[in-house]
Image: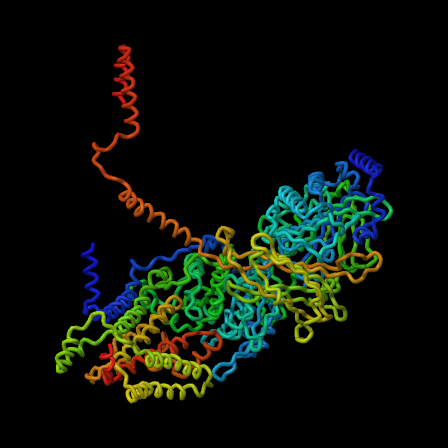
Amino acid sequence: MPRLLASALSLRRDPRLLKLPPYLSLLCIVVGVVWLFLLPLDDYSRRTYISENALLPGQVHTYFGGSDQNVFRAYKHETDELAGKGNIEVNDKLESIAKGLGLKVGRQNFTYSSAGNTHSGQNIYAILQAPRGDATEAIVLVAAWKNVKGEPNRSGVPLVLTLARYFKRWSLWSKDIIFLFTPDSIAGPQAWVDAYHDAHDSSRVASLPLKSGALQGAIALDYTRETRFQSVHIVYDGVNGQLPNLDLINSVNHVAGGQMGMGVAIQEMWKHSNSYHDRLQTMLRGMLKQGLGLASGPHSSFIPYHVDAVTLQPFGDGWQDEMAIGRVIEGTFRSLNNLLEHLHQSFFFYFLMQKERFVSIGTYLPSAMLVAANFTIMAIALWVKSGQPEVQKVITEKTETAEEAEKLALPNPHAAMERDLFLPLVLVAACQFAGVVPLYLFNHLSESALIPAFVLFTVLSAILPFLLSNLLHTSATSTTTQQYHLIRSFSLLLLGMFLSSLATLNFSLAFLVGVFSAPLTFVRPCPNSPILKWLSMAVLYILSPTTVVFVASVLPDLDEKVGCGLGEVLRQAAFAWDVTGTYTPVVVWCVWWPAWIVGVVSVLGRPGAGDGKVKNA
Amino acid sequence: MRRFFASFLLSLLSFLCFSPYAAIANASSAADSISTSISDSRSDYHEQLILRPLPLSALLASFNFRSNTSLSAFEAHNFRFFPRSLGQILQHAGTRELHLRFSLGRWDAESWGARPWNGAREGGTGVEMWAWLEAETDEEADHKWLTLTNALSGLFCASLNFIDSTRTTRPVMSFQPEGNHIDANAANTHLLYGVLPHEVVCTENLTPFLKLLPCKGKAGIASLLDGHKLFDSSWQTMAIDIRPVCPEDGECVLQIEQSIDMVLDIDRSKRPRDNPIPRPPPAHDMKCNTSKPYHAHDTCFPTDSAANQDWSLSQIFGRPIKGTCPLTDPTVSPVCIQVPDSRIVFASEGAIEKKNPDQTSRCFDFPAENDFEVFLPAPETQDGSVVVDQHLVKPETPLLYAERSFTGHGQERGGVQTILRNPSPDQEVEFIYMESLPWFMRIYLHTISARVDGQPGKADSLIQEVYYRPAVDRARGTQLEVRMTVPPASTVFLTYDFEKSILRYTEYPPDANRGFDVAAAVITILNRDKSVGNSRFAAYNLRTTTLLCNLPTPDFSMPYNVIIFTSTAIALAFGGMFNILVRRFVAANEGPENGLKKGVNRLKAKLAAMFKKRGSTPAVMLDGEKKME
């Protein structure tokens, strides 16, 4: 035992130990990324299962159909006549139909302004009061007049009306059912949910005239097709990468796939062969959506309020008709109606690989944590390093006087250097706070000014490191190696800290930012090797936040041929910030961008001018 | 006939019994309006069913059963119509007046208008009870209240025994006794109020309710009461009110009034019982709006014809009324329907229709032996458009609309907002708003505020008086009574904030993630018209819906995982380690002999020594026995 301790202690003083952290960091990154790629394998992912026994999905007969189809056709004629008409006119018609069904109807006006544009409209909703209920709980069925892509929800709106008429006949509902019709898919539902929980800004969003109990779940229907379909696509990503309870997705999957015999797709994987490749692709698409944190449908706004929600989109050419999707909704609502408690049994943090395979947070979280840990390891190593006298210098300075050389040749292993903290702290803090500037700019400029502002900002952010570097170099007391170590140490420490906390909230965003900023761990001032210096610079500029945003905007989308363009990306980001409260811009401009600036500054650094501190030690 | 005779004799007897209370009762002041509205409070039993069609194909059925017993007979344990089981409980618990409510569903005031009995016979969702008890001290009152709730819990198969101190309050302003008490405000009369919002009312509560009736649901209007229909209604409330009534010119009586009010959905009730599933009707049976241009054999815009349906008693309740209860007062018509006189109502043979002078209601008398049936045909319509006023009695506008909901989200704090709307164009409404909140909702009293919608300046004068009794953790709930006014034709928002406390993990119910029910707020609109014969304290009562409050709930599987994990770790690691540390290991032959062997050897030695002394043979035998062991 004592020998073991002694060897451990001697190892601690081994100078080789200080060389270890970069390799350890590299190992963390490699393991983290490889870990992610192992997840789709059978050994690491699990089959989904229904955790909440009360749900009993697919256990009831569904009766929607028959003459209800005639009613659906009639309602479809009614809503088709409204195509192209104003929001108020549409709502008048919907109100007359809903009131005719004996439902309580409420309306709500909202106005959002984002990037100089005004998004206003009027929501209309009808409450079917549970026949024997007491307004303590409610479930929501949403049909937006237009879906996320702006296509009219031609079959969805009449189908929801038909379902409202059908549900009214049942006496078994234990929860109120709210039918919500919104003019668009993001702002309308957001305004409604905010107002339902009284979290709205009453100057922009009106309060709701009618309310019911606590929302227990929501299903949105995005049914633009007018022909028969084959499968149903479940969209489940919420704002900021929050996900609905896995039980809800499983229930829909059970009802649609098991009971109704239709295909189920997720993450726009229209064909899924359940191979490793397809699973990985599904997972990566899910990660990308989660990382961006945008609202992906009318359901997204519900999830931050702990209301589990999904959007159903029928797709593909097949033989399933409107009644089939109606029955899927009926079956799902019957399941939700059974709930005695709020959905809480199953997972809230997961990746779906396929409709029936998932990995839970315990399995995937180490991946992002390892990536985040690499920055922390390096930060600690740099901190330790900054406190030690430099051995290399001692060896090169052999021409000094003999006694001095003797003194320095045997450096005391316990020797510590005084750390000069002021300059590094100021620089890192300044960079962090500078991140507020782009955050404010891109969220408050009008749409036309966004692209010029972005170009200007890209140029400025490319020049800024050079300016800072020159400032450091020409300042009265020239920056030392130790200070460069400390600058990098603080910056990496912050980055590691932010990313590891972010990983528990939004794994994908933390992972993506972590991977993009991985080079920041390894770049260092290299005054002696211009090749290395400019190579590092090239890598950093390719992986800079501005470049990544630009490339992402011009890259082809998942199923479109061309990217949506820079202006659209910036507009959407501003919209997401203003309306749904997406925090991705904060992470990009206030976490990633400052770390990147500091990284470039340290590559450009020309330390070594001042070596007086070593002697002071 | 014999039964009639017997009952007559009994009633004679009860009249002959002289009550010592009568003299005091005469001295008591103005009689309660409820008692005076009854033709004769001493008529011993009567029952009445009032049917009122409501808009949107709903039907309100109010069953009312009332029986009296003179206080002297009651004191002498002489029960006739008054149920003995209940009477003995009341006597044992020293109860002066008792009100018990079992309610389900919600009253849709927007479409159905004012509540039946002006809301006096209803409670919030779940079970609600309040009683005036006779007790010298608060502790004694609590004790009697405990006795009463536990006894009633057994009688009505409801969890009334869960009304403990945290769910009991002592309202100060909201309730006044309905009966004539000799000394209603005396120090030895205690009002206690308890509510169980989560109690689900069902058939097991109906059966004991019917058993209290003289005819037990076998005859008379009570024969319509069937659990399947009653609990399929959109709104129902069962009420039991027991109060002493002292008419000015007679003996004091103890009155028990049982009432059931229910709103039935006619469509749903008419569905046959063996086929209750609302399957889509065949296409040719659908009522379509043929005026639509797209109308075709496969396209049908449904008309709202459901609003005016025909119905009959046996369609809705599943059976006709089985005669009248022979004990009932024959002067009171057992069935009344509130429809305009212009509508045709068919009744079964032998029934006598009596139209009331108000032109909006009619009553039926029918022979005791025959089944009774009422059929209300759908009103005749001209070109499809029906004016509601013509075929329905227009629902009365309630004095106040109230809606309560939670504001805010998250598990730390929240708010409650009650929207109170006064529909009257010129009359102010003054009322008392009472909340009895569970202790884990800690309200911030300073945040309580009332504002008139659209008039920010007028907030000050709305709240006139606040009575607040703060909660004590795990011992007492919050009691909040606010006397306030709502100006005419305006909407008032009453809001306050609260903080959610964290429970101990054993305090969570099994369905912790459902949330915790918060009892309905009780709104008592004060009676301003104190003219003669209308001396009631409350002009109108209403209750808001209950709320579901989400508290921070731990992941309950986690403690179990931790317990299992640590137990395993201790069992495996600690057990082995402890053994190694504490035990001294020696070779088997070196160790001391263990207990049994030692004892046996000692016994052997003793026996050997004994037998050596005696020198007899059995020693050998014994030795042999030991060896066999």
Residue furthest front in the image:
A403
Quick check: B508 left or right of B379?
A: left
- Name the quarter where the N terminus of chain A is drawn: bottom left
Q: Position of residue B587 (x, y in %)?
A: 20, 35
Position of residue A349 relative to residue A82, above or below, is: above
Asked whether residue A343 appears in the rendered view, the answer is yes
> Can residue A261 be seen in the rendering of this structure?
no
- Viewer-proximal residue among B604 and A518: B604
* Direction from residue B424 to residue B544 in the image, left or right: left
In the rendered image, the quadrant that contains the C terminus of chain A is bottom left
Above or below residue B326? Residue B230 is below
Horizontal and vertical percent position of residue B297: 56, 65
- Identify the residue at horizontal 57%, vertical 71% (top origin): A124
Nearest to the observer: residue A473 or residue B16 = A473
Q: How is the image coloured?
A: rainbow
User: In the rendered view, does B237 fall on the left or right side of B414?
Assistant: right
Which quadrant of the view contains residue A443? bottom left
Residue A438's quadrant in the figure?
bottom left
**Vertical placement of B185 versus B150: above or below?**
below
Of A39 and A476, the residue lying toward us: A476
Please state the horizontal and vertical placement of residue B54, each as a whole percent of the image.
Answer: 70, 59
Residue B114 percent location from the top left of the image:
72, 61
Judging depth in this view, the residue of B200 and A355 nearest the camera is: B200
